[in-house]
Amino acid sequence: MTEFSTHEPTTNSLDTNDDSEIDAIAELRKLLISPEQEKLEQIQKRLDDPQIHAEDISRVLPEAIILRSLQNDEQLTQALLPTVEEAIQASVKKDLHVLANAIFPIIGPAIRKSIATTLSTMLQSLNQTLEHSFSIQSFKWRLEARQTGKSFAEVVLLRTLLYRVEQVFLIHKKTGLLLQHVTADLVATQDADLVSAMLTAIQDFIQDSFPVKAGENLETLQFGELTIWIEQGPQAVLAGVIRGNAPEELRLVFQQVIETIHREFQRELKIYEGDDSLFESSRKYLESCLQSQYSVKEEKHSPVLWILLGSLLFATGLWSFLSWQSRHRWQTYLTRLEAQPGIVVITTGRRHGKYFVSGLRDPLAINPLTLLQESNIQPQTVVSQWEPYLSFESNFILQRAKQVLQPPETGTLAINENGVLSATGSAPQQWITEAQKLVRTIPGITQLQTKNLTETDFQELTHSQQQIENQILLFGENNTELLPSQDNKLSILFKELQNLSKLAPYYHKQIYLQIIGRTDEQGNNEKNLVLSQARAYKVLSILNSQNYSSINMSAVGIGTKQPLFNQYMQKEQALNRSVSFKVFITDDTTSNKSL
C-alpha cells in the first residue's frame, strides 16, 4: 500500500505567514497612497486653520477685485459699499484730519474748476443775454414770445436749438408696456404709458398693413418739428423724441444704450410680467440719450458788455476810493477830536449811511464843526451829539477865571496843578477885593494868591504925568516941522497918554493936557507968537489922530515968553523952538463911582 504523506501546517507557521502578509500589505499601501495621504492631511489642515485660510485669501483678493471690476459688475460695488461707508464714518469720528488731509490735494483744484466753469457759464450767459436783448432779432423773438404766450428765454432756446432729445421711452417688445421713461428739463410731457401704447400700435399697424419683410421694423417717425427714432432690441424697444435735426452719431448712442440694457437686464426682460420697478436702475442709461446741441456763434463779446464791464469796474474802483477816502478822513477827524482838550468822545460809528459821534464837550473847547471843515468832511454827513460839561484841565479853569475876574492889563493870572490861582503884576485894590469874592464861584479854583500882586494907586497917574511933561518936541528954524529925531519922544508921549486914558476912569479922574508952543528970539514978537501957536496946533493935530477920548487937550502959543532956557547960546535958542506939555489931573465929578 502506497503511503501518502500529507504535510499539515502547524499553528505557528500559519501565524507567521499572516503577519508577513499584513506587513506586506501595509508596505504596499504605504508605497501606493502615502504621498496623496500627506497632501490630503495638509489640505485639511489649511481648511481647518483660519489663519492660513485668511493668508491664502489675502494673496488672491486684490487680483480678484481687479478682475471683478473689469467686468463692470455692480454687485461688487454694492457689496463693498456698506463696508466703505462705515470705514469712512469711523475714520471721521476717530480723527477728522486724516480724511481731510487725504482729500485736501483734490479739494482746491475741484473748487477752482467749479468756480471757473460757473464764471465762464455766467459770462457766456450774460453775453448771450445782452446780445439777445439789444439785437433786432431779439425784438422779433420778444414779439413771438408775446404772440405765442411763451417766455422770452424759451423762445431764444428754441430758435438757437439744433436738436434736442426731449423724451426717451423703453418699451417691452412683447407686451408693448412701458418699462421706463425719462424727459429733458423744461419739456412738457403727456401720459408716457399712452405714448408707449400708441407707438406699439403704430408699429403693429405698419407691419399688418404693409408688406414688410421679416426682421424689418419701424425706425423713424416724423411729425412737424418732432422726430421719433426707434431702436429695436430682441426684447425691448428704445424710442427717442427729438426736436430738430439730430446727427446720425446720436443713433449710435441709442444702439449702445439698447444693447447695454439687454445685457444688464437680460433676466428681468425675460421674467417681466408688468413690474416696471425692475428697470428703475436703467434710467441712467436712458438719461445718457438726452443730448442736445445749440448753435454756437463765434466767440465775440458784445461792445455793450465791454462798456458795461468797464463802467462797472470804474464805478467799483471809484466807489472803493471814495469809501477809503471817507473812512480815512473820518479816522483822522476822530483822532484830532480825541486829542482836543475839553472833549471826551464816547461813541462813534455809522448809522443809516451817516457817521455818528457822541460825547462830552466843555463850552470853552474847540467847536467840533471847525474840525469837520478842516478835515474836508461834509457836516450834513455827520450826526453829532455833545453833552456840556466842565473840564478841570488847567487851561480851561484859567480861561474861566479870566472871563469872570476880568484882570487889568497890568496883572497876570496863572494856575497850578492844585487849583491855586496866582495873580502877579499890579492891579487896583478894588479889583483885588472883588476878585477875592468872585474866585469862590469858579469851579476848579481852590485859592487865590495875590502876594506877588502890587497894588496900584494914584502914583501911576503922576508918573505918567511927569513923563509927559518931561518931553520937549523940537522944531526947525522958522517953520512948524518937527525935527526927524523927535520920533522917540512922540512914542513916549503916545504910551503915557494911553496909560493916562486907561487909568483915569479907575481913579475917577479927569485929564487935561495943555500943549505949549515956543520960539527963539529971532524975529519980532508978533511973528514969533503966531509961529509958536502954529507949532502947538501941529502937535495937537498929531495927538488927536491917536484918539485919546478921555483926555481933554488944548494948544497955546506963547512966542518968546517964558523961555525954557536962557538964550545966550545958539544951542539954547534951538531948544526954545519947541513944544512942551502940561498935564492937569482933577476929580471926575461926572463919572460913576461904582466902576
Image (tube, rainbow, N blue to C red):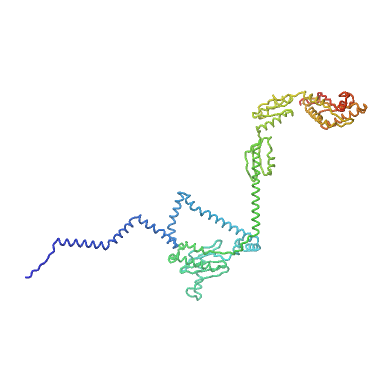
Of residue 184 and residue 81, the one placed in the foreground of this image is: 81
Q: Residue furthest bottom?
A: 211
- Looking at the image, residue 491 sits to the left or right of residue 300; the answer is right
- Looking at the image, residue 457 sits to the left or right of residue 178; the answer is right
Does residue 370 lie above or below 430 as drawn?
below
- Looking at the image, residue 446 sits to the left or right of residue 544; the answer is left
Residue at 64% of width from left, 28% of height from top?
Answer: 418
Q: Would you identify the image quadrant in which residue 116 lies?
A: bottom right
Does residue 169 lie above or below 590 as drawn?
below
**Residue 595 screen position, x and y as percent:** 76, 26
Residue at 52% of width from left, 54% of height from top?
Answer: 107
**Residue 291 screen position, x and y as percent:** 54, 64
- Looking at the image, residue 310 sits to the left or right of residue 182; the answer is right
Q: Would you identify the image quadrant in which residue 147 lies?
A: bottom right
Of residue 404 and residue 47, the one placed in the foreground of this image is: 47
* Number of on-image labels: 0
Q: Residue furthest left?
A: 1
Quarter of the image that includes the N terminus = bottom left
**Residue 2 screen position, x and y as percent:** 7, 70
**Residue 382 screen position, x and y as percent:** 66, 43
Q: Would you identify the image quadrant in which residue 528 lies?
A: top right
